[in-house]
Amino acid sequence: MQMENKRFKLKRFRFETENGRVIDRYMITDNLLPILEVNQWIEAKSLRKVSTGRKYAEKLLVYLNYLDSYDVEYDVATNKEVVTFIQNLIYGSLDDLKIRSLDTVITYATLSQYVTVITEFYKWLDNNYETNMQFKTKTDTFRAKKSFLYGQIYSYDYKYIIDRYLPSLKGGKEYIKWYDESEKQALCGSFLTLRDEAVFRLTLEGFRIDEALSIKLDNYNPVERIIQPTRSKGRTSVTGGSRNNLRTVVLPAKTCELLDSYIATERMTAENESGIISQYLFLNLRKGKCYGMPLSYRNYLAILKGCARRAGIDSAKIRTHSGRSTKVMEFIEHQILHPEDGLTDAIMLECFGWRSTDSIEPYRNHNNQVIARTVMEKLHKGKGGCND
């Protein structure tokens, strides 16, 4: 069935705000009419970035049209429908005996994104809409909250379907997840601007790239060598004159020297020549329509990949998150090499802005030779040496 014949569609709407500005929003329509509950959720996802709301809407749209093909409404769907939807994404439609060709296999990451969108959507419905529905049994009739249905969907472990049936999809792309010293030095020496190296060095201190790009001038104290982001995953963003309660990071002297030089030269020039007075620390330096505006993630990713090519590193294996992974492993190495320093997991949670030690696991390198050698030497200490 072609998209033009689908019941649910994604449309772009343009609105005028109270101060006269015009903003764009993406909304899902039901037979060309916007759906209140669905679009309230999409709007919540669009508050930080409109593009984020659009990505969530695109995934939810596929799910809604799938349900409609079986005459099921989203507010009465159960986890059975969600499971069959995921299986349909993996294998294709089994109703007409058509399966996916090998060259169109969906990736593990994309499947995980669908699961995230669906479960977050039903969590939001459960929190915001408490309408009731009737359930009938053989003996009597009773009322139950619709949130019972929503809860069974978002609490269901759909990931096992992906992990069990599609192990080959996980990790389809190979990245450099942890930098060694030579790679760090090669990258730092291959940037074309002070700004770009400064951003990279902040990721090596454990910042996510979005956190680094969210930093404002008044969040950096060069005297105390401390810095704070204004956005952080899973935390409330700092807006206006509100107090910044996001984590504070103390920077090495080298990184501060780099930041100070960037602020006094490249940034000052961009601000003066563009005529744009910006609160953000990292600005676009290339003359053009974006000159003097905040540096974006997409722009920096391209810069980082270009730097990798100049450093002789495969740019296809470069990602912005590897600096943070590298910093986590530095902590873990130090914990094992120097337990007397008392760098506990609780301290690590504070330094990286996490709430649970479970967040450490995806960053752990189980193939770390430094840790392996240290453990072996400690186990064989006093037993005749490690060459026995």
Image (cartoon, rainbow, N blue to C red):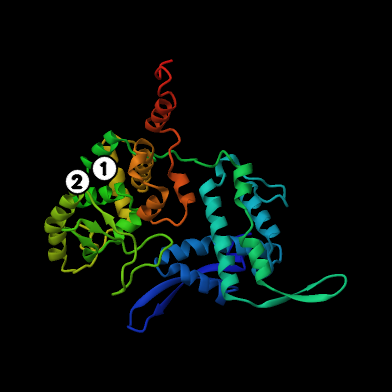
Residue 56, compared with residue 126, is above or below; it is above
Question: Quick one: which residue is furthest to the top in this view?
Answer: 388
State the residue in front, 384 or 182.
384
Q: Is residue 137 left or right of residue 106?
A: right
Q: Residue at x 47, y 61 (%)?
A: 55
Q: Amino acid at mark 2?
A: Leu
Residue 269 percent coordinates (x, y): 12, 60
SS at circle 2: loop
Residue occupied by mark 1? 307
Q: Is residue 273 left or right of residue 330?
A: left
Residue 143 percent coordinates (x, y): 75, 76
SS at circle 1: helix
Q: Amino acid at mark 1?
A: Cys
> Image quadrant of residue 217?
bottom left
Quarter of the C terminus within the rendering: top left
Asked whether the beta carbons under mark 2 and mark 1 sit within 8 Å of each other, the answer is yes
State the residue in front, 352 or 210.
352
Q: Residue at x 57, y 44 (%)?
A: 105
Mark 2 or mark 1: whose residue is earlier in sequence = 2
> Image quadrant of residue 37?
bottom right
Residue 166 percent coordinates (x, y): 60, 42
Residue occupied by mark 2? 192
- Could one spot residue 33 in this view of the protein? no
State the residue in front, 108 or 129.
129
Residue 146 percent coordinates (x, y): 67, 72
